[in-house]
Image (spheres, rainbow, N blue to C red):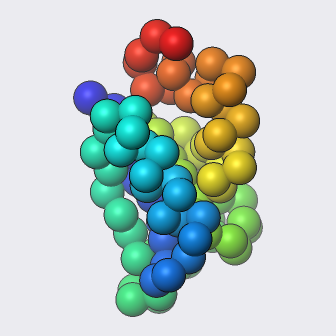
Amino acid sequence: MPRIEVFTSASCPYCIAAKQHLARKGFSYEEIRIDLDPTRRSEMLERAAGRRTVPQIFIDGTHVGGYDDMVAADRDGRLDALLGTRA
């Protein structure tokens, strides 16, 4: 099972959509609330090449991007490759 990390903040609609998308695909994830822990915000900024918006999604350490990036990756098969599943 791949390690999925989702950096989020409270009441972010794209964060909610990203988590629902992963759940629909049958994957669990670690949610990291950057609004509750400023050190994790700094970690997200560093790992996501300065991207400040949430969600920021990582699969086995690979930066997928935000919700729109994840959906685009799902449409073209890159997400399944990262998750180790078939389309």
> Where, quadrant-wise, is the N terminus in this rendering?
top left
Q: Compared to 61, does 55 lie above or below?
A: below
Residue 26, by quadrant, is top left
Q: Position of residue 11 (x, y in %)?
A: 50, 81
**Residue at the extreme top:** 86
Residue 48 visible (yes or no): yes
Q: Nearer the viewer, residue 63 or 79?
A: 79
Q: Compared to 20, does 72 lie above or below?
A: above
Q: Nearer the viewer, residue 17 or 34?
A: 17
Report how many numbered discs are placed on residues in the image: 0
Q: Compared to 41, does 66 lie above or below?
A: above
- Which residue is pictured at 62% across the width and 42% down the height? 70
- Which residue is pictured at 73% across the width and 67% down the height? 50
Q: Position of residue 48 (x, y in %)?
A: 64, 58
Q: Position of residue 85 (x, y in %)?
A: 42, 16
Left or right: 27 in relation to 41: left
Residue 63, by quadrant, is top right
- Which residue is pictured at 39% across the width and 89% down the height? 36
Q: Position of residue 73 (x, y in %)?
A: 67, 31
- Which residue is pictured at 52% across the width and 54% down the height? 18
Residue 44 visible (yes or no): no
Left or right: 57 in relation to 45: left
Residue 24, by quadrant, is top left
Q: Compared to 85, does 23 lie above or below?
A: below
Left or right: 57 in relation to 29: right
Q: Nearer the viewer, residue 24 or 46?
A: 24
